[in-house]
Amino acid sequence: MNKKGAKVQGSAELEQVKILLIGVALVTLIFRVSFYDPFNSPKLITVSILGGWLAGHLVVSIRNNPLVLRSQEFVGLLITVCFLSSLLISTLQTKPIIIGLIGDIFRRNGFVAYLSLAIVFLYSSRAITKNNSLTIYKSAVLTGLIVSGYGVLQIAGNDFVSWNNPYNNMISTVGNPNFASALLAILFVLSLFGLLLKDLSLVYKILSLLLLILAGFAIVKSESRQGLLAIFFAVLFYFSIYTYMRNKKYGLAFIIFASVISLLAILGMLQRGPFEQFLYKNSVSVRGYYWRAGLEMLRNFPLSGVGVDRYGAYFKEFREVAYPLKYGFDITSSNAHNTIIQLFATGGIFVGISYLALLVFVFTIGMRGLKNGNLEDKKLLLGLISAWLAFQAQSLISIDNIGVSIWGWFIAGAILGISYKRKQSDKTLNKDKVISTQSNKVKVNLLQPLLSVIFLIPILLFTSILYRSESDLNLIKNYASIKNKQFVVDRANKILNNHLVDPNYRYITALYLSDVGENEEAYRIISEIHAFDSRNPEYLKGLASLEAFRNDPKKEILVRNEITKIDPWNAENYLQLLALYKKIGDVRMMNSTLNMILSFAPNSEQALKAKSLVEQIE
């Protein structure tokens, strides 16, 4: 390839990747205070639009440069298609299907999110090359400075937004200290290893040092250890492999040392070994309950799972009895806090296996890619693999937050892109004229924007509905707090009349109607939603409260008996049932309910109250 042609090609590749880098940064940084969910829904909207636009680029890229059958890239595409296909099948079986598409409230990990992330992954694998890969490190530094800078402002008590935040102040742009810590860990790792690259400019190295200071401070102050642990494992991996590449003898010794240290660290987190006092947190034990509940869901629904992002609707049914006894009868979880288990539990075995296959594929191709190129090329790729492993490390104990996940999928695609393109570029080196002098002319390719617009039309329709419902519900919340009944009723109708709105938002709207005195309307709406989704524990809880307000004990008994089927270890619900049986004079059922409480919670406050109620009858 001549110098002029190479320059033109490099410029074209850089232009291709700009929208990708900007999009990834926007997904991480965006939030909207006027939304009911100010973090997750804006990120879902943004990643959906990014995915739709890149889909046009991806189709044109494959059209212009077709995949070679049986090539590594074809295998990667095949695994991704298998993952998305199996996830789509599970989504179509999810009830209600709208939750399968957009995900649960305050999570938004539905099919649309994973489809968009997969498109980012596939496009990255084609757009990112060795020639433009430094832009990933630069983008990470710039994004990291904003994320960490905002986190430091929050730590200092100078946040420009008054968040209603029950967590540590350092939530940055992702809404939770654990997510913020994990995100900063990934950007920290990229900045750290970017410092070791000769081709990274002095300006970016100075900015990287600043990011290391700000991010390190913010991670520590977040009081979330998962960020520090992700950095720890990434650094161990990087220097283990780097040492091995330089000297196999010393490298093997370092790998053994790193493996032992890693094992001790994992044991410490699990309340075992010498590192227990430094690494163990009670939250790890809590995650054990979440993981086991997820595995129990998989055992009972192996093919389709319980429904995409429907973990929360089934958690109380499959949680161990020790969980409510230890943490409270009404405490629940809407996620397994482990991405792999979450996908197995909610999507089924085919979704889980295809996702695991994708992880293995990325790691394998990345490690093979380290065998090629000079030392600088290897350091660049090794830094990306290490950052990707940092993402995977935190995903084993955390929720799949879109603002964090976008980096995991993007970096995974970049790892493949660098590895794929190296082999393809070696073949093209023998061609004298890959790009002719005509490449200097501006060519308008109408196919890509046309396809992107076609893909974006349904996405914009979907996101506009989500956008309006988020804004309307947030306004309803604010006006309900000041008892502005007319405004609440008017805005509520906008949400309730749209059947494509998240049913959770219809339910919350009904609760706000009840707050301003529209109890019968709230009752009607929640009854309809319950008929639509009969096993959602929140809907049943709300319905039981309204039946109590309407003073209809027989109907409330029916609702609370429904609750026992999907929440069998809730002593508080059984206590309410016992009181209702007393109200209607059913002594036999009072005794039966008391025995149920005593069977699993004999020493609880609810058991004492239940005994007292029965003794009053006797």
Image (tube, rainbow, N blue to C red):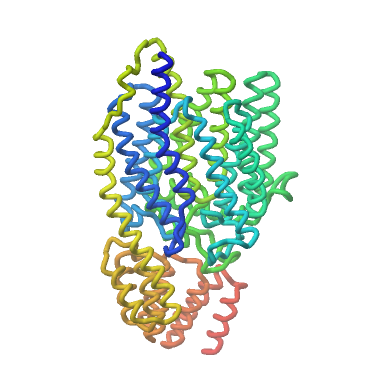
Indicate whether 42 appears above or below 9: below
Indicate whether 29 appears above or below 205: below
Indicate whether 332 appears above or below 602: above
What residue is rendered at 51% in x and 89% in y? 617
Left or right? Give the position of 141 relative to 89. Answer: right
Indicate whether 597 appears above or below 456: below
In x, y percent, where is residue 132? 47, 29
Which residue is nearer to you in this view: 563 or 331?
331
Q: Residue furthest front?
A: 441
What residue is rendered at 56% in x and 45% in y? 144
Which residue is nearer to you in this view: 399 or 61?
61
In x, y percent, where is residue 67? 33, 24
Which residue is nearer to you in this view: 117 or 24?
24
Question: For residue 383, what is the image quadrant?
Answer: top right
Asked whether residue 295 appears in the rendered view, the answer is no
Q: In which quadrant will I find the N terminus?
A: top left
Question: For residue 122, what is the image quadrant?
Answer: top left
Which residue is nearer to you in this view: 463 or 4?
4
Asked whether residue 425 appears in the rendered view, the answer is yes
In x, y percent, where is residue 159? 58, 61
In x, y percent, where is residue 435? 34, 18
